[in-house]
DNA sequence: TCGATCATGTAATTGGTTACATGATTGC
DNA sequence: GCAATCATGTAACCAATTACATGATCGA
């Protein structure tokens, strides 16, 4: 799902501001999705113009005003269409994987550094995912929890896979 | 690696034309990388302008002329820099994974359809990878073969993971 | 007083894709 | 005669990012 699809999805439970959406993207959804303000605000504007969401301005005295967006019926309907549209092929463009193909150009030490850097990235993502575990388990429904577990397994498999590859590489040359 | 990085890498073994590069991308490298003509030709022009590669025009009588590009010393050096630059974090933006989070909106049948569509995509990629196996095993060096195996394992793990998730989803109301 | 958090937004840039344009040759 | 392969290229578009701009409030 793109920014529009994700926002529509998140707006189902409750009305949210762009700022709150960003937070959700960078905390709960950080592993598999995430958009910056530069995507979120223009998307909200466009969707409001198209009648998928409606906006209510909340005047605040001690903080900047907030624009609270709510899903309309039309938006709800659009989201269902999006969910039922053909599943797009994933791309897994791994910088690590593309570099392996040219490892003959590097010293054994450099190869190990790249592998380790990649493992560090995976570990960091796993750590992040794990740190949001309790939060997710509270708020999430059964499907969302399964998505969470899916992500964890994926990262663990990837880590194993990289480690196995690095071991073979170490034996090489 | 981006288009420029990949092209520089592929140009190490031998001189190639844009057309030949495209072929390599869509056959041997289809799983983890791949660029269209719209990326390749402009990249080649730019890199020639920057002295990373040199061009030789081959006049053909029975076919269109070919522009054969060869890596220069400067290009070789640049490629080494690229290989040693910090590894970028991967993104695994899976359409399937993002949809799971909103599966409560769908009927059990629709959920299964999405899961199956995703499995089909994975299976198709595995099939493609397998069909290039002999070709890759002939031409590739040891590291490239490891990259190939890495890709196969990744897809198989992913498939297992999706299947497990779908089984849990099926049990869910 | 300084950094974090709240809050919205735009402009420039990136890095790709798709569709289009051109045109000869070869094999079925 | 028609499709595929060879071969190069451009223009329009897309979906995102980054950096910038603005500015108040609150806690250490």
Image (cartoon, coloured by chain):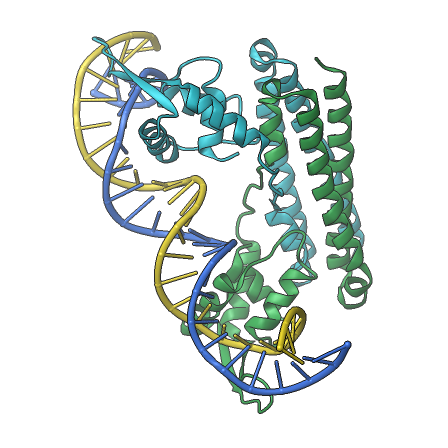
Chain colours: A green, B cyan, C yellow, D blue
On the rendered structure, is A22 left or right of B154?
Answer: left
Residue A3 screen position, x and y as percent: 53, 59
Which quadrant of the structure image shows residue A171? top right
Q: Going 62% across and 42% down the picture, which residue do you hit?
A: B90
On the rendered structure, is B5 left or right of B149?
Answer: left
Q: Is residue B137 above or below residue A1?
A: above
Q: Is residue B103 above or below residue B58?
A: below
Question: Which residue appears farthest toward the bottom when viewing the image?
Answer: A61
Quadrant containing the C terminus of chain B is bottom right
Q: How many marks?
A: 0
Residue A166 screen position, x and y as percent: 74, 26
Q: Nearer the viewer, residue C9 or A3?
A: C9
Can residue B62 be seen in this snapshot? yes
Which quadrant of the structure image shows residue D26? bottom right
Q: Is residue A26 above or below residue A72?
A: above
Q: Nearer the viewer, residue A111 or A65?
A: A111
Q: Going 70% across and 31% down the picture, which residue do you hit?
A: A113
Which quadrant of the structure image shows residue C3? bottom right
Q: Going 62% across and 30% down the picture, which residue do you hit?
A: A97
Q: Going 36% across and 29% down the picture, which residue do you hit?
A: B47
On the rendered structure, is B42 left or right of A46?
Answer: left
Residue D11 screen position, x and y as percent: 23, 44
Residue A133 screen position, x and y as percent: 80, 59
Can residue A69 be seen in this snapshot? no
């Amino acid at each position: 799902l793109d920014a529009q699809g994700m926002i529509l999805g998140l707006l189902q439970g409750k009305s949210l501001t762009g700022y709150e959406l960003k937070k959700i993207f960078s905390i709960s959804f950080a592993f598999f999705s995430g958009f910056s303000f530069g995507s979120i605000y223009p998307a909200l504007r466009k969707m409001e113009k198209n009648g998928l969401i409606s906006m209510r301005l909340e005047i605040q005295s001690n903080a900047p005003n907030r624009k609270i967006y709510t899903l309309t019926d039309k938006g709800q309907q659009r989201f269902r269409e999006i969910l039922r549209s053909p599943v797009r092929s994933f791309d897994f463009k791994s910088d690590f994987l593309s570099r392996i193909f040219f490892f003959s150009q590097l010293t054994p030490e450099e190869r190990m550094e790249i592998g380790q850097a990649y493992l560090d990235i995976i570990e960091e993502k796993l750590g992040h995912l794990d740190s949001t575990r309790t939060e997710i388990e509270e708020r999430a429904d059964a499907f969302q929890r399964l998505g969470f577990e899916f992500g964890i397994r994926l990262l663990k498999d990837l880590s194993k896979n990289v480690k196995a590859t690095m071991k073979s590489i170490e034996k090489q040359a």
